[in-house]
């Protein structure tokens, strides 16, 4: 088959993982991936519903895809347009109403059907399909074997969330928590390493509440799994994301002390530093409990760098609440962070709470928070200058003859390097720093 596909991914790393799995399935049908939407016979948007902006962007992209489809039609070429991911789950039948030219829409737990669906549309053009079932079966049972795409691979070990933070759509789009069995994860991990990955990033919406069954049907935690994964020869780096503060237990903290392969970096979102806001968010931790977890992690590994997500302007957030958030930043000194204005998501409890914060105030607070976060990030990056760091090169740099890679701390580093170093971990001397990246020289 001389056909091509194009996938655009929005949102989180779980979506990146899912897109990679879909690409593999389409390749198995004989289709080739292209980065040019105009030449694709199958166009897939893997969507994100977490904030309004991300969700709305999909519809403008879909509008553009329809124009391209019409242009291609004039040249006698057919185009299949598909939508997958969390917007499909949240909008359900609305999606086909808002974008009637969409050929198929599969929810995040149903994309394993993509091959069958695309095949049937190729054969019988009039087919339209929407599948947003919250299936009892695990999609992982239906996915073909995963193979490495590069030196660093994502591996989904857990999906869904039972926390129901009041602002968040995830429990409604990805469903309740499901952990994959230990052996299944280990098999996928081994295969990814055998096919070229030296780094694995274990993924889950609430990854540290992982409780997969082992061979004997005994439930095991994330620390157990990390220890098993660390035994894989050829694997050099392990990460896991995203963690929930109240579910960080002592076993997991010990991993940061004992497992050399576990990178000294942890993304541990606090969202807000105010106890009253945390309560309204339905978070199961206070500011002090969070700070205690960070302290323990730093005791286990003094070199650990922390990262977080923050939401400003949650309903009822006062200036004092916001100051508490800044206080957390000043105490933890994050080396990286993601911060967002609160976005009202339909169907979530917070969207109908009183005292919604004015857009102007949200904007001001976000600016203040980001300025502070960037200061710490820049300072950390500047302190890296002069150091020798192991960098995993992952792709082309900004200029010719340059590659880009990641340090253990997830810093982006650019260096002059030839392609033979791609997907390898290489010693690099850091020679320059900005807020978002480092420059270095390969040793
Ligand atoms: N508004 C703003 N940010 C949100 N997030 C989740 N839901 C919302 C929302 N309604 C942020 C949280 C989460 C990250 C993935 O997205 O900070 O950790
Ligand atoms: Fe959403 Fe909270 Fe679950 Fe994270 S922990 S996915 S923010 S509900």
Image: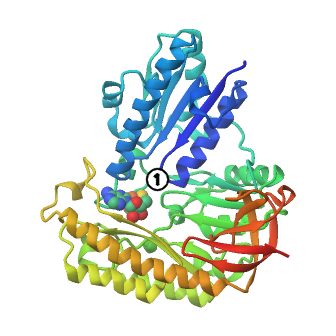
Q: Quadrant of the N terminus?
A: top right
Of the pair 239 and 410, the residue shown nearer to us: 410
Q: Position of residue 221 (x, y in %)?
A: 59, 65
Q: Residue at x 35, y 83 (%)?
A: 326
Q: Quadrant of the C terminus?
A: bottom right
Q: Position of residue 230 (x, y in %)?
A: 75, 67
Of the pair 15 and 256, the residue shown nearer to us: 15
Asked whether, in this view, residue 83 is left or right of residue 311, the answer is right
Q: Position of residue 224 (x, y in %)?
A: 65, 68
Quadrant containing ligand 2: bottom left
- Is ligand 2 closer than 8 angstroms to the Cβ of mark 1? no
Q: Is there any visible trace of residue 146 in the rendered image?
A: yes
Q: Residue at x 61, y 36 (%)?
A: 22
Which residue is situated farthest in the front direction here?
A: 400
How many numbered marks appear? Answer: 1
Q: Is there any visible trace of residue 313 in the rendered image?
A: no
Q: Residue at x 42, y 25 (%)?
A: 130
Circle 1 SS class: loop
Residue 88: which quarter of the image? top left
Residue 158: which quarter of the image? bottom right
Residue 357: which quarter of the image? bottom left
Q: Is residue 404 above or below residue 37?
A: below
Asked whether, in this view, residue 192 is left or right of residue 254, the answer is right
Q: Position of residue 194 (x, y in %)?
A: 83, 52
Location of mark 1 (residue): 177
């Amino acid at each position: 088959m001389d056909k091509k596909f194009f996938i655009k991914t929005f949102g989180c790393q779980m979506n990146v993982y899912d897109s990679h799995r879909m690409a593999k399935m389409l390749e198995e049908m004989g289709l080739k991936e292209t980065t040019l939407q105009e030449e694709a016979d199958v166009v897939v948007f893997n969507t994100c519903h977490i904030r309004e902006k991300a969700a709305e962007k999909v519809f403008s992209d879909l509008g553009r895809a329809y124009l391209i489809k019409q242009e291609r039609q004039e040249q006698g070429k057919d185009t299949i347009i598909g939508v997958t991911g969390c917007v499909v789950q949240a909008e359900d039948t609305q999606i086909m109403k808002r974008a009637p030219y969409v050929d198929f829409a599969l929810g995040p737990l149903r994309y394993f059907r993509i091959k069958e669906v695309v095949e049937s549309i190729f054969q019988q053009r009039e087919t339209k399909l929407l599948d947003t079932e919250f299936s009892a079966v695990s999609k992982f049972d239906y996915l073909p074997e995963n193979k490495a795409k590069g030196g660093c691979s994502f591996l989904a070990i857990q999906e869904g969330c039972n926390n129901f933070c009041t602002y968040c759509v995830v429990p409604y789009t990805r469903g309740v928590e499901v952990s994959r069995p230990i052996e299944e994860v280990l098999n996928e991990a081994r295969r990814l390493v055998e096919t070229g990955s030296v780094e694995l990033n274990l993924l889950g919406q609430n990854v540290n509440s992982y409780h997969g069954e082992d061979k004997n049907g005994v439930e095991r935690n994330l620390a157990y799994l990390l220890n098993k994964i660390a035994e894989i020869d050829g694997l050099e780096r392990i990460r896991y994301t995203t963690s929930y503060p109240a579910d960080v237990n002592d076993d997991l903290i010990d991993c940061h002390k004992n497992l050399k392969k576990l990178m000294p970096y942890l993304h541990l979102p606090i969202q807000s530093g105010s106890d009253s806001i945390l309560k309204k968010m339905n978070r199961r931790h206070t500011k002090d409990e969070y700070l205690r977890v960070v302290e323990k992690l730093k005791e286990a590994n003094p070199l650990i760098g922390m990262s977080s997500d923050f939401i400003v302007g949650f309903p009822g957030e006062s200036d004092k609440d916001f100051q508490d958030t800044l206080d957390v930043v000043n105490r933890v000194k994050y080396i990286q962070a993601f911060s967002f204005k609160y976005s009202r998501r339909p169907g979530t409890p917070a969207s109908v709470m009183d005292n919604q914060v004015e857009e102007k105030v949200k904007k001001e607070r976000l600016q203040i928070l980001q300025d502070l976060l960037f200061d710490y990030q820049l300072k950390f990056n500047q302190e890296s200058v002069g150091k020798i760091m192991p960098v995993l090169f992952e792709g082309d740099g900004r200029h010719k003859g340059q590659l880009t890679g990641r340090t253990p701390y997830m810093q982006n580093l650019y260096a002059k390097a030839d392609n033979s170093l791609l997907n390898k971990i290489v010693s690099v001397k850091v020679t320059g720093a900005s807020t978002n990246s480092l420059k270095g020289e390969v040793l």
